[in-house]
């Protein structure tokens, strides 16, 4: 087989692999969302915290609107997953452009796509935990992040500080490692150098994102 034929086959295999990963992520996230609404976000979760503040009719109206938004949320999942992958991929690509590393955007996307599997782990763990230990109120779910520094926060901690604590977590570190391993494999360089590339690309993008969210929450 000619080198052109092998190159074409490799590109085709990469595209197929990317699509398989992408649809796998979407199916998992949609499944988590669907079963969460069936078994975790039950009516009792809304009635218990609100039954002393809102009349029953008001609560039912809120729940009715939530049911309508649920399906819209499923339609947004592919877009959200794509952006979660495309943003770090773009950071890696821009770094390669400025530093003459010669990594194509498709390859950067493939690296970020494979690294996305890291974020499935906490999503599945969170779903499994609340499936067996149903929360008493919604705030418990939003604050749930035992693998992060969120244990430093309390009820009086500002929301932007809570977000900051939750961002610094074990899976974020693992995500960096997986991205760095992908870069190391693509460029055939040392892991230390690839980790530095991740820090100068995705790391800077992450800092900008954290600053933006903290500003909006403050």
Image (spheres, rainbow, N blue to C red):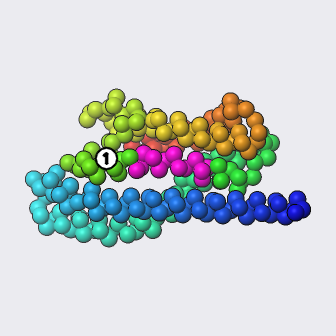
Q: Is residue 189 visible?
A: yes
Task: State the quadrant of the C terminus.
Answer: top left
Q: Mark 1 points at which residue?
A: 129
| Lateral position of residue 200 relative to residue 42, left or right | right
Instruction: Residue 165: give x, y in percent of width and height.
Output: 41, 34
Residue found at x 82% / y 60%: 6
Q: How many marks?
A: 1
Q: How crowded is mark 1: few (under 14 residues within 10 Å), some or many (20 or more)?
A: few
Residue found at x 38% / y 69%: 71
| Lateral position of residue 156 relative to residue 185, left or right | left
| Lateral position of residue 134 relative to residue 206, left or right | left
Return the residue nearer the eye: 209 or 112.
112
Q: In which quarter of the image is residue 51?
A: bottom left
Residue found at x 23% / y 65%: 63
Say if 166 sits above or below 87 in the image. Answer: above
Q: What stretch is highlighted in magenta?
A: 112-124
Say if 75 sits above or below 136 in the image. Answer: below
Q: Element at badge 1?
A: helix
Instruction: Residue 35: give x, y in percent of width and height.
Output: 33, 61
Residue 123 falls inside the magenta stretch: yes
Q: Can residue 90 be seen in this view?
A: no
Residue found at x 27% / y 56%: 40
Task: State the quadrant of the N terminus.
Answer: bottom right
Characterize the magenta stretch by its predominant secondary structure.
helix
| Lateral position of residue 74 relative to residue 141, left or right | right
Q: Quadrant of residue 183?
A: top right
Q: Residue furthest right?
A: 2
Residue 130 falls inside the magenta stretch: no
Instruction: Residue 30: give x, y in percent of width and height.
Output: 42, 62
Return the residue nearer the eye: 172 or 14.
14
């Amino acid at each position: 087989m000619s080198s052109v034929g092998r190159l074409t086959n490799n590109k085709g295999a990469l595209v197929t692999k990317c699509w398989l990963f992408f649809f796998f992520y979407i199916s998992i996230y949609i499944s988590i969302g669907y079963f969460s609404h069936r078994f975790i976000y039950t009516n009792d979760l809304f009635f218990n915290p609100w039954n002393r503040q809102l009349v029953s009719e008001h609560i039912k109206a809120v729940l009715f609107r939530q049911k309508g938004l649920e399906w819209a949320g499923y339609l947004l999942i592919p877009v959200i997953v794509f952006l979660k992958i495309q943003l770090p991929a773009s950071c890696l690509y821009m770094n390669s452009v400025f530093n003459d590393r010669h990594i194509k955007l498709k390859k950067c996307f493939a690296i970020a796509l494979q690294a996305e599997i890291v974020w499935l782990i906490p999503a599945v763990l969170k779903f499994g935990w609340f499936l067996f230990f149903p929360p008493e109120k919604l705030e418990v779910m939003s604050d749930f992040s035992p693998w992060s520094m969120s244990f430093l926060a309390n009820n009086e901690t500002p929301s932007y500080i809570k977000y900051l604590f939750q961002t610094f977590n074990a899976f974020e570190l693992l995500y960096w490692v997986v991205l760095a391993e992908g870069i190391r494999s693509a460029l055939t360089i040392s892991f230390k150098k690839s980790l530095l590339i991740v820090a100068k690309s995705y790391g800077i993008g992450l800092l900008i994102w954290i600053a933006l969210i903290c500003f909006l929450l403050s």
